[in-house]
Amino acid sequence: MFAHDPSAKEQGGLSVGVPGEILGLYEAWQAYGRLPWYRLVKPAIAIARYGYEIDRFLYFQMKNTEEAIRKDEGLREVFMVNGTLLKVGDICRDIKLANTLEKIAFFGASVFYYGPLGADLIHDIQEKGGIITVEDLKGYKIRHTKPISAKVMNHEIITMPVPAGGLGMIMA
């Protein structure tokens, strides 16, 4: 799939897999959670809506990927004002993300996997050359697997097994 364009593994529609984090967090909350779901999501909504300060590290990352930010409408909306990258000390807000998280907070994961949020995401991915379908999203299931662990510098690291990136993190 990537023989003609190896960079497609890292950017663009083909680099995107079926998103599972929302369903994974929601199912973990259903099994083990004690607080209301909305209360867990509320801090992320606040950060997206009211913003956070751009620090030097984030600004450095933005400068290194400025060309990609300029090419992507969604990234421009978040990380630029009037065609200029936000600077250190500026406040970065993502109102669309806040609104999305708010819907997920009120209605649960199903609004993402079976509703218009997911359909909109799939449309955006396909516009960028992706092959994920609404059926892929609706059919997504969480696989419960045992974590992997390793001792690293006198700390036990417990993380996700292959095909997730946990092994790479331990090896780094």
Image: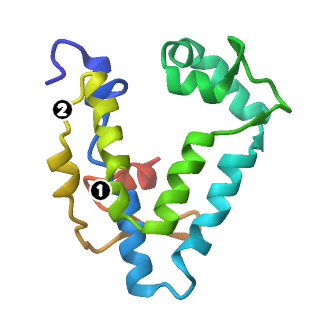
Residue beneath disc 1: 113
- Identify the residue at image location x=36%, y=59%: 111
Q: Identify which residue, 19 or 167, lies in the foreground.
A: 19
Indicate the position of residue 1 as horizontal and vertical percent values: 13, 24
Q: Identify which residue, 154 or 129, lies in the foreground.
A: 129
Classify residue 109 by image quadrant. Answer: bottom left
- Alpha carbon distance from label 2 to label 1: 16 Å
How many numbered discs sit on the rendered protein?
2
Q: Is residue 4 left or right of residue 82?
A: left
Q: Is residue 152 left or right of residue 109?
A: right
- Farthest-out residue, front: 116
- Farthest-out residue, right: 89
- Identify the residue at image location x=52%, y=27%: 74
Indicate the position of residue 108 as horizontal and vertical percent values: 42, 68
Residue beneath disc 2: 131
Q: Identify which residue, 172 or 59, lies in the foreground.
A: 59
Q: Residue type at mark 1?
A: Tyr
Q: Residue type at mark 2?
A: Ile
